[in-house]
Amino acid sequence: MSRKHVLLGSALCLTASVSWGAMFPVAHIALQHMDPFYFSMIRYFIVTVILICLLWLKEGKSAFRLEGKGGKLLFYGTMAFTVYNFLVFWGQHLLGESGTITASIMEVLMPLISIVIIWYKTKNKPTRATMTTIYIALIGALLVITNGSLSFFTMVTQNLVPVLLIFFGVVGWVIYSLGGSEFKEWSTLRYSTLTCMLGTAVSVIIVLFLSIFDLIQIPDWNTMVSVKYEMAFMAIMPGLVALLSWNAGLRILTPVNGILFISLVPITTFIIMAFQGYSISLYEFYGALLVIFALIQNNINQRKNANSSMQVELKTTQDSL
């Protein structure tokens, strides 16, 4: 992989991660007025309409053919746009004020979850260097958010159900991220559009079912208007832009390397809180440095592995000649 491709993939994953980091504080405001299920469904319904228009204009009607992969697309779409979308914001809503920080911290578990899933599927143990950078990023992000205090973990044990909802939602997004590697012959836009379309369709069905039985509250027009700015941001940046950037970035860097950038999600959330008047401590400062170090070290490891692979291939070619 060339340096140019590594930088492009890193920039795309960085864009997505920063957008998602800003997502939780904005969602907290909206969830005070709107049910999390309707909020999540409407958000990605808007994204779906935009994606359909983009795909139709760029690749034409033929790009909407499922080509016998409808089952996989439905599964991965449901994991991302139903399981992740519903469970994370439901859990955040149940936790209240602390849900913003908790949801951000759970995002940091994505690299570890992806490693476990890949390890289980391929039976190939990850390299020590990969595991080390992931652990460093995890420790750094936890230092930033917890501010070196163990009281956060006491809070988690008292709110187990919402935390588990967020955790299983995060697992859903990891599965979706790994699933993109099965559609390498498709464009990023096509994979994103079809999975988003099918996943959102599942979300609409669930929301209609819950509404019919009065299990969730249907938002009125005034409620919709009151969160119009939050909804616009959530649909465009963490929704459309982050989705396309994330899938494209993972395609370049591979899921194991790209997903490490998710460590920047809680960092971004913390920075937004700092701009709102939050005082930065030494724990938070050094935690941020650890995350940055892990990202740089992972890039160095990528280059070393790429160079080693090229040397092996060159030697094999020379021997065959």
Image: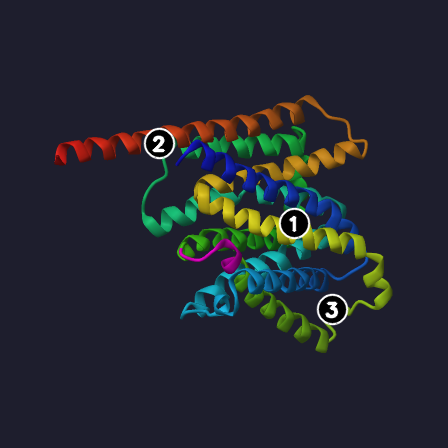
Q: CA distance from mark 1 to mark 2?
A: 32 Å
Query: Residue 258, percent across and down?
Result: 49, 41
Q: Which mark is residue 94?
A: none
Crowd rating for badge 2 (residues with CA inside 10 Å; few <14, some 14–19, many 20+) = few
Q: Residue at x 44, y 58 (%)?
A: 186
Amino acid beneath label 2: Asn
Q: Secondary structure at mark 2?
A: helix
* Residue 78 makes an appearance in the image: no
Looking at marks 3 and 2 on the same chain, the residue that comes earlier in the sequence is marked by 3
Q: CA distance from mark 3 to mark 1?
A: 24 Å
Q: Secondary structure at mark 3?
A: loop
Query: Residue 119, percent across and down?
Result: 37, 46
Q: Tell which of 90 and 208 is nearer to you.
A: 208
**Residue 186, magenta (yes or no):** yes
Q: Which mark is residue 305?
A: 2
Residue 31's place in the image compared with 7, above or below, is: below
Query: Residue 151, percent across and down?
Result: 68, 35
Query: Residue 272, percent across and down?
Result: 74, 36
Q: How many marks?
A: 3
Amino acid beneath label 1: Pro
Q: Tell which of 216 and 234 is nearer to you.
A: 234
Q: CA distance from mark 3 to mark 2?
A: 51 Å
Q: Residue at x 43, y 44 (%)?
A: 254
Labels 1 & 2 near each other (Cβ < 8 A): no
Q: Residue at x 81, y 31 (%)?
A: 277
Residue that label 1 marks: 238
Q: Specify the segment rendered in magenta.
A: 185-191
Labels 3 & 2 near each other (Cβ < 8 A): no
Residue 65's place in the image compared with 110, above or below, is: below
Foreground: disc 3 or disc 1: 1
